[in-house]
Amino acid sequence: MIQKIIPIAASITLIGSASLTAYADMVLSISLDTFYSNKDYATRKI
């Protein structure tokens, strides 16, 4: 019984960490884009 649970738990953990990494990557790139566009906007305003 335990032998069946371990691979499932391992795959869930792998998928979870992969999606978390992808999510963090997406959030980081969006915040960087926002930061740079705001910086450009501020530079243009001045």
Image (tube, rainbow, N blue to C red):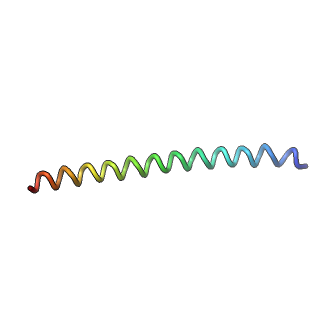
Instruction: State the residue at coordinates (10%, 56%).
Output: 45
On screen, residue 27 versus residue 45, left or right, reads: right
Q: Farthest residue toward the right?
A: 1
- Count how many numbered circles sit on residues in the image: 0
Q: Position of residue 43 (x, y in %)?
A: 14, 52
Image quarter (top left, top right, bottom left or bottom right) of the C terminus:
bottom left
Instruction: State the residue at coordinates (53%, 46%).
Output: 21
Nearer the observer, 15 or 40: 40
On screen, residue 39 versus residue 13, left or right, reads: left
Q: Position of residue 1 (x, y in %)?
A: 91, 49
Nearer the observer, 38 or 1: 38
On screen, residue 24 versus residue 42, left or right, reads: right
Instruction: State the residue at coordinates (43%, 52%).
Output: 27
Instruction: State the residue at coordinates (23%, 54%).
Output: 38
On screen, residue 41 versus residue 10, left or right, reads: left
Q: Position of residue 5 (x, y in %)?
A: 82, 49
Q: Position of residue 24 (x, y in %)?
A: 48, 50
